[in-house]
Every structure is written in structure tokens, then in C-alpha cells.
């Protein structure tokens, strides 16, 4: 009825609707690309180098859970126009908001440290000292987030994510992997009772489905001022982000499986030089270009993570206490938001300078394990809020979405228990 009144043809109406959907894209894609940050690339690289193609099934399984958890987070942002910590504070009080935010920040600090370690590992291939790389990364990220605005930050994040994706796609193809074995491992799990195997499984899940990602998607949807009418575009955004996250993760596993595991190259995955070793292992198979592509991809992903994770941490902390949040605010209008963001960046950079280089790879890997262990605490709040009809209105989670969400949460708890059983009890 509205199209004739406005003088629009059905084709023109469809173009307007399509443009509206494209305008919604951003939060899901940024969140998805940022999942493949330095810690993610390290985890995928270690998985491929240690276990070959055997853990590809984890990426397929976690992609399904990632889509549904991100979709719920986006829906919460669409329905309420608020971030996760702010809603928890309103519904359950400051104490519960502080508890959830504390769990998230513990995981986030490890992830931010991992981003700086990733910058150091990537730039080491170009003979840049670690202190210089940390200072450079901190300066660039702080200037970007304090001087930019929403649209510039979003487009830059998406552009970096696309660049990282292309780099690892090319690296995987140039490594000449066994695509048949990779496809088989994707759908047929190869389980093991080895504690290191399950530690890597947990780390792989933890780098794909993160506490910060859950909060980021909701805060960014709210910051973009999207509403219930944007549900279709938001689901497309989340779906693309989840798909690209795991697709690129799969390419990294495949590249490292072909370059290290398949040819029996020895790489000490616990050493400070582990990621440069893996990058150099691509050279005999694919030439020096693939080595530098891998390094550039790691550097770009580290910068992307350094932009997103401190930003999410500042969002969560400010929302928990009702302070102004958002990258469209000026520094003097939201001093707590920008102050906390700079604090997270600076303190993580300092840790990287203090921690011995031999411990950085373990920090990057174990940060993803901590993500997985703490994620259920965040998801419990998300699932309870998404089932609240008064809060969500027409966007309330139905029986199917609630079932999938609670099953995903339960699966993460089972993974945590399995890790403890295999590591501590030796079963």
C-alpha cells in the first residue's frame, strides 16, 4: 500500500529494502572477523601443527553454536537498544552486573595481551624488536579509537578483516594441502583421550565463541541505533560473520597442517618463536610470499583484535555502572569510557614488555582456554534475558532458539569438565 503512495515501483521498493538490509551490516561481520585475532590465529596454527586436520570438526560444530549465540546477542540489542551489562544491571542489580563483567574482563585481559604478543610475533619476521612493536600497536589503536567515529571505525575493521581472510585463503591454497582428508576431518570427528588434544579443543572453541564477542555484538548493535525492524539484516550480518570466522579459521588449520604436520616438520609450539617457525615452514611449499602473507595476516588480525577487545571491555565496564559509552562520543563527553579503553590497552602492552618472550605463546593459547571456561557465565545471563517476554517483546526467543542456546551452554560446561578430567584426573 505504501509503494503506490510514494510513487515507487515494486522493483524500487525491493531495492530500498535491500539497501536497508545492507545498512544493518557491520556488527556481526566485525565481531566475526575479530574472532580470528592473534589468539585465534595462534590457536588454529597450533591445532594444525600438532594434530593436522583432525580438529576441523570443532570449527564446524562451533560455527553452529556461534551463529545462535551471536544471533541472540544481536536480538537483545535490537529489542532493548542497550548493551548486555547495562541490561543485567537493570534486571539483576549492580552486584550481578559486576560479577558478569568481572568474568568477562578477566578473559578480555588475556585476549588483549595476546593481541600485543601477536604483533610482536608478526613483526619479528621483519626484525622489529618487541618493545617497538608494542609501543607502535598501542599508539595506533588508541589514536584510531579516540579520533575516529562509528562509521570510520566500522569500515576500517571490516576492511582489515577482509584483508586477513584473503591472506590466509591464499596461504592455505599455496601450501598444497590434502583437501580430501581435510573434508573428511570436517565431518568425521577423530577423538582422543590425550589431555593436550582436549586442551586444544577447548582453546579452539574459546577463540571462536568468546565472552567479549557476546557483549560486543549487542553493544555495537545498540551503538548503531538499530531496532526490531532490522532483524532480517542483522541475522544476515551475524550469519556472514559466523561463516567467515570459521572458514578462515579452517584455512589457517589447513595451511599449518600441510606445512608442518603433513611433512613432519618439528615446531616447538610452546616456544616464543612458535608462530614465526610455523610461518617459515610455509616457505619450502609455497615460497617466501606465503610466509610474509601469513605474517601480515597475523599483524592485521592483531590490530583488529586490539581495536575490538579493549573497546568491548570499556563498553561492558561503563554499562555495568551506567556511564556514557560509544565511539561517537567525544573524549571529554565520555571520559570513563575512553579512559578505561586506554587503560586496558596500556596495561596489556606493559605486561607484554614484562613477561619473558618464552611465555607469550602460552599466554596467547591459554587466553583462549580461559575464554571457553568463562563463557558459560555470560551465556546464562544472555539466555535468561532473551526469554524475558516483557524485555524482548516480539523478539523474544522461542522454544527452538532457547533449546539450542541452552544446549550450547551445556556443551561448553561439558568441555570444561572434560578438560579438568583429562588434565587433573588423568582420565
Image (cartoon, rainbow, N blue to C red):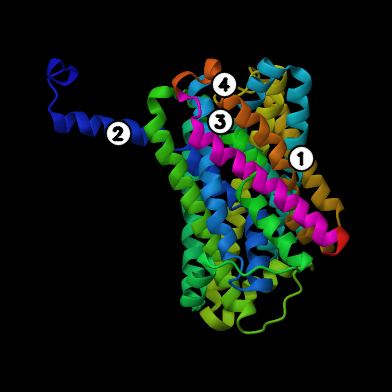
- Counting residues from the start of the chain, the first of labels 1 and 4 encountered is 1
Main SS of residues in magenta: helix
Mark toward the start of the polypeptide (4 vs 3): 3
Q: Earlier in the sequence, mark 3 or mark 2?
A: 2
Residue 194 sits in which quadrant? Answer: bottom right
* Crowd rating for badge 3 (residues with CA inside 10 Å; few <14, some 14–19, many 20+): many
Q: CA distance from mark 1 to mark 4?
A: 39 Å
Give the magenta part as a residue range.
Answer: 395-423
Q: Earlier in the sequence, mark 1 or mark 3?
A: 3
Instruction: Tell me where residue 262 appears, x and y as whole percent.
Output: 60, 81
Q: What residue sits right under mark 1 in the picture?
A: 346
Task: Nearest to the eye among marks 3 and 2: give it.
Answer: 3
Quarter the C terminus occupies: bottom right
Q: Decide whether residue 313 is among the magenta residues.
A: no
Give the labeled residue for mark 4. 388
| Disc marking residue 218 | 3
Tell whether label 3 touches label 1 (CB within 8 Å).
Answer: no
Q: Is residue 125 left or right of residue 62?
A: right
Dot in front, 2 or 4: 4
The front one of 279 and 398 is 398
Dot 2 or dot 4: first in sequence order is 2
Work out whether 233 lies above or below 124: above
Label 4's element? loop
Quarter of the image for residue 13 reads: top left
Which of the two marks, 1 or 3, is nearer to us in this view?
3
Q: In which quadrant will I find the N terminus?
A: top left
Amino acid at each position: 500500500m505504501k509503494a503506490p503512495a510514494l510513487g515507487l515501483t515494486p522493483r524500487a521498493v525491493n531495492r530500498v529494502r535491500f539497501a536497508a538490509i545492507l545498512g544493518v551490516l557491520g556488527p556481526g561481520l566485525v565481531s566475526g572477523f575479530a574472532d580470528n585475532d592473534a589468539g585465534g590465529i595462534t590457536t588454529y596454527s597450533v591445532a594444525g601443527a600438532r594434530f593436522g586436520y583432525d580438529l576441523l570438526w570443532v570449527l564446524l560444530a562451533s560455527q553452529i553454536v556461534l551463529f545462535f549465540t551471536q544471533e541472540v546477542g544481536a536480538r537483545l540489542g535490537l529489542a532493548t537498544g542497550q548493551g548486555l551489562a547495562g541490561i543485567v544491571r537493570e534486571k539483576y542489580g549492580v552486584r550481578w552486573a559486576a560479577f558478569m563483567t568481572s568474568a568477562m574482563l578477566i578473559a578480555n585481559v588475556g585476549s588483549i595481551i595476546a593481541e600485543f604478543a601477536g604483533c610482536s610475533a608478526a613483526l619479528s619476521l621483519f626484525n622489529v624488536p618487541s618493545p617497538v612493536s608494542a609501543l607502535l600497536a598501542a599508539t595506533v589503536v588508541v589514536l584510531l579509537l579516540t579520533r575516529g567515529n562509528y562509521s570510520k571505525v566500522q569500515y576500517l575493521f571490516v576492511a582489515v578483516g577482509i584483508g586477513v581472510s584473503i591472506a590466509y585463503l591464499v596461504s592455505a591454497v599455496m601450501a598444497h594441502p590434502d583437501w580430501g582428508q581435510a573434508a573428511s576431518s570436517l565431518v568425521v570427528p577423530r577423538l582422543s583421550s590425550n589431555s593436550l588434544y582436549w586442551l586444544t579443543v577447548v582453546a579452539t572453541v574459546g577463540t571462536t565463541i568468546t565472552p567479549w564477542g557476546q557483549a560486543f555484538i549487542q553493544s555495537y548493535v545498540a551503538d548503531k541505533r538499530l531496532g526490531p525492524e532490522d532483524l532480517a539484516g542483522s541475522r544476515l550480518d551475524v550469519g556472514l560473520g559466523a561463516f567467515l570466522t570459521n572458514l578462515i579459521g579452517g584455512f589457517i588449520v589447513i595451511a599449518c597442517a600441510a606445512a608442518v604436520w603433513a611433512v613432519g616438520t618439528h615446531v616447538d609450539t610452546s616456544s616464543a618463536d612458535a608462530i614465526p617457525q610455523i610461518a617459515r615452514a610455509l616457505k619450502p611449499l609455497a615460497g617466501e610470499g606465503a610466509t610474509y602473507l601469513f605474517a601480515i595476516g597475523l599483524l592485521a588480525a592483531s590490530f583488529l583484535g586490539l581495536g575490538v577487545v579493549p573497546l568491548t571491555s570499556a563498553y561492558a565496564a561503563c554499562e555495568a555502572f551506567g556511564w556514557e559509552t560509544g565511539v561517537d562520543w567525544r573524549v571529554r563527553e565520555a571520559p570513563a569510557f575512553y579512559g578505561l579503553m586506554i587503560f586496558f590497552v596500556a596495561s596489556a602492552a606493559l605486561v607484554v614488555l614484562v613477561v619473558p618472550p618464552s611465555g607469550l605463546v602460552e599466554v596467547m593459547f591459554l587466553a583462549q582456554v580461559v575464554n571457553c571456561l568463562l563463557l558459560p557465565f555470560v551465556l546464562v545471563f544472555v539466555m535468561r534475558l532473551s526469554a524475558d517476554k516483557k524485555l524482548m517483546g516480539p523478539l523474544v526467543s522461542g522454544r527452538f532458539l532457547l533449546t539450542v542456546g541452552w544446549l550450547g551452554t551445556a556443551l561448553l560446561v561439558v568441555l570444561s569438565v572434560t578438560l579438568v578430567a583429562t588434565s587433573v584426573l588423568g582420565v
